[in-house]
Image (cartoon, rainbow, N blue to C red):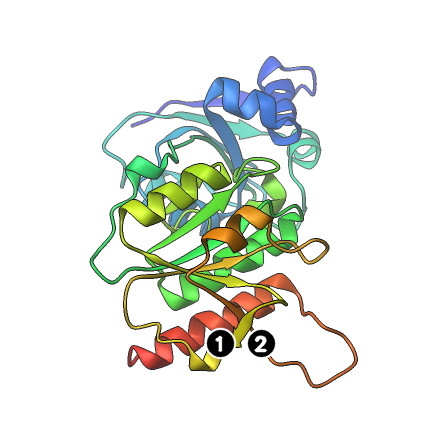
Amino acid sequence: MNEIKEISSLQNPLVKKILVLKDKSRERKKEGLFVLEGQRELELALKGGYTVATLLFHNALISKEEILQITSQLDYQIDLISVSKEVYQKIAYRETTEGLMAIVHSKSHGLDKLQLKDNSLILVAEAPEKPGNIGALLRTADAANLDAVIIANPKGDVYNPNIIRSSVGCVFTNQIAIGSTSEVIEFLKSQNIDMYCAALTASESYTKIDFKKAAAIVVGTEATGLTQEWLDNSTQNIIIPMRGEIDSMNVSVSAAIVIFEALRQRGF
């Protein structure tokens, strides 16, 4: 059984470490660690094969028995720490979570780590900036059970607490890879995966595309769209016909529409 330690001081070095890990992408990459919050998120991380280093809890919100039940499922030892109300309020984003936080080892997200099948369906997002959009894209990918999500030219890291929260933990359930646009294009070509790029020019309606073969649906930012490199290498640019006054939708909504058309064609 894990020994349970206690922290009540806001000046404790671990409290300071957690705050830095939450705020600084550079520190997360340097340490190979990130912070998650909430029981559902922890369960999904464990299901996704992540390794927990430290589990912190506030026993007014979750009992020691519940914590021990969670840790009994692990085949390795972790640090268990009970924190005071003041410490929990300092390190938690929301008081309404279940009183549970964890420091977790991050994974490698190289393109070479992806395990794909012959007719994989993949979502590629180039340079997404807003954590809420990234989280929504990951939720869509999970809902569709996509084979992978690839982030090209990332602006940050996938372990940003806002991404974890907005994805409702789906950052742990998707197979995610990261690379530069050039690397991702080269990888997709090497795997004989067609690239269907969301764009306003030289585009076909997404409903006219045959998505039954291995395909990557590629989306850019709402502000600038995809870079020319994608358009130059696109198998076919695609567009969602718009009937109102604006010419674009939220990137996660657009991606969802095309992804579920691909699933429809594949018989769900």
Residue, x 69% and y 15% (percent of image)? Answer: 11
- Residue 146 showing in the rendered view: yes
Q: Earlier in the sequence, mark 2 or mark 1?
A: 1
Q: Quadrant of the C terminus?
A: bottom left
Three-letter amino acid code at the position of disc 1: Tyr
Residue that label 1 marks: 206
Locate residue 13: give its quadrant.
Answer: top right
Contact between labelled residues 1 and 2, with CB atoms less than 8 Å apart = yes
| 119 vs 89, nearest the viewer | 119
Residue, x 48% and y 64% (percent of image)? Answer: 140
Q: Quadrant of the N terminus?
A: top left
Locate residue 86: give its quadrant.
Answer: top right
Residue, x 25% and y 46% (percent of image)? Answer: 115
Side (left or right) of 50 relative to 166: left
Element on which disc 1 rests: helix
Element on which disc 2 rests: loop
Separation of residues labelled 2 and 1 (CA atoms): 6 Å
- Residue 168 showing in the rendered view: no
| 143 vs 71, nearest the viewer | 143
**Where residue 150 is drawn, which disc sits there?**
none
- In x, y percent, where is residue 78? 36, 26
Residue sitting at the far left = 118
- In x, y percent, where is residue 95? 68, 46
Residue sitting at the far bottom = 243
Residue that label 2 marks: 240
Mark 2, other Cα within 10 Å: few <14 / some 14–19 / many ≥20: many
Q: How many marks?
A: 2
Residue, x 79% and y 80% (percent of image)? Answer: 245
